[in-house]
Structure formats: structure tokens, C-alpha cells
Amino acid sequence: MGLVRIAELRDLCECTILRRVNRFAVECLNKGRRVELHLRNTGRLSKLLVSGSRALYKPKHGGRTHGYLIAVDVKGGYAIVDTTLQMSLFEIALERGVFSWLEGFKLERRNVRYASSRFDYLLRKQTLELLLELKSATHVEGSVAMYPDALTKRGRRHVAELAQLAKRGLRTALYFLVAHPHAESFRVFREVDEGLYRAVLEAVESGVDVRALKMAMDENLVVHVSSDPLPVIWP
């Protein structure tokens, strides 16, 4: 599995997680001061947002919160929890040609509406179009990354519509972004959302390109992205 250096993150502050305030906020401790950070990830993140865990955040000026929670220390590296950053790193990797199966594809548009949903990207390669949805998978048990970590009605709708569009002849893709250094494989977390699991199976059968992509941040805050997809386990 080839890892390609994508970025080195700077201007991040250290903190200690105290508690999750709500779906979008986490209370942390920075140099003895309590700070409330915006969380751009709607997952449960129960294995990461643990009281006492070391984390990194990006400060911001203005607004109710002090910054954005970016990553959580997982010993030997960091799990990137900020989905906005995950997508930015994916875009850098795409532009640099890291993914051989996407060779020649360029980012045409973000936040693209098809059917009753909005999808993350429309990619183009000459006359070929590819509709792509990304899902953040930072729940890891042992070396296996999983998605979702909570029931996701929106996720099921996205996957089902990708399958329907694929049946109509549109090129579609569903990529799980595994932003955790310990992950060596991926599976859909069937025990959490059976409906999502069945929707992904149908998507594969319908021709949706389903892959799991690994990105990992080391202790020096350098991010690498794997040029090969992770093995996907189908229980």
C-alpha cells in the first residue's frame, strides 16, 4: 500500500477533550482554559471523543466557538475528525493524481444536486462524468474501520439514489474516507445500520464504484493518503 505525502498541518493548538456538548460542539481544555470547539462531523465518534483524550484544534476569531476540532490523538498518530478537512485532503490527492482509477478526472462541481439529494462532487474526464459521494469513517475497532457509527437515514437515501442513478447509466461512486492511522481494512457497520448495509450491497450490484480510501496523519502532523484502496470486508 503506497502512502503519498499530501500536506503538513500547521497553526493547530493542543487541547484535552472534556465532553461533547451537543451534535456540533465539544468542550475542551487548553492551557487551563475551557474552550468550546465546533465539531464538523455528525457521527457519534464514541471511541474518539473520550474525556481526557488529547486533541488538536484550529483557532478561529469571532462566533460562539473558539475554533474547529480537527483531530484526536490515537497513539502513533491522529484520527482526523473534521470532515471539511477530510474533503480538502481528498481534493488535493485527486489533483495530484494519487488514485490511479481516477486518472484524468478533474473536479467539475461541488455539492451537486441529482434526484432529491445533493452529492459531494461531479468529476469530469473529457466527456465522462462521475457523480461521487464521500462518507467519513473514523470508527475503528482493532484495525477495521467501520461506517456508520450511528443510524443514518440521510446516508441510506444517498446510497439508494446512487444505485438508482447507476441503473440509469450514470457513472456513480461511493468512497468511505478512513482518516485513521490504525485502519487496515473497512466494512459497513451492519450491526449499527442494517438498512445502510443492504443499500451498499445493492449499490455495488447496481454498478456503483464503492471503495474505502485511507488517509493518515502522523505525530509530526504530516498527512499521507494511500494510493491503493483499503480491502473491504463483506460479512
Image (tube, rainbow, N blue to C red):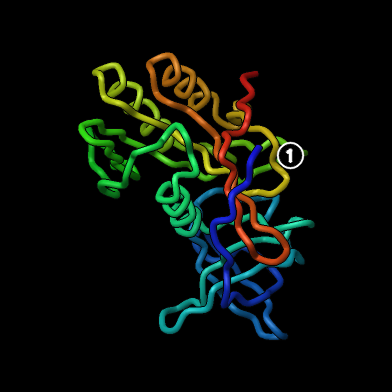
Of the 4 image quadrants, the one containing the N terminus is: top right
- Residue at image location 45% in from the left, 19% down from the top: 204
Q: Quadrant of residue 121?
A: top left
**The residue under label 1 is which amino acid type?**
Glu
In depth, the one of 36 and 165 nearer the eye is: 165
In depth, the one of 228 and 195 nearer the eye is: 228
Residue 149: x percent and y percent? 59, 40
Left or right of 131, for residue 235: right
In depth, the one of 125 and 207 nearer the eye is: 125
Q: Quadrant of residue 63?
A: bottom left
Residue 122: x percent and y percent? 28, 41
Relative height, residue 159 to residue 66 (above, below) = above
The number of discs equals: 1
Residue farthest to the top?
A: 205
- Residue at image location 45% in from the left, 52% down from the top: 87
Relative height, residue 217 to residue 180 (above, below) = below
Q: Secondary structure at mark 1?
A: strand
Of the 4 image quadrants, the one containing the C terminus is: top right
Q: Which residue is mark 1?
A: 141
Relative height, residue 32 to residue 4 (above, below) = below
How many other residues sit within 10 Å of disc 1, few (<14), some (14-19) or many (≥20)? few
Residue 153: x percent and y percent? 42, 35
Residue 134: x percent and y percent? 44, 41
- Residue at image location 63% in from the left, 46% down from the top: 3
- Residue at image location 26% in from the left, 24% down from the top: 170
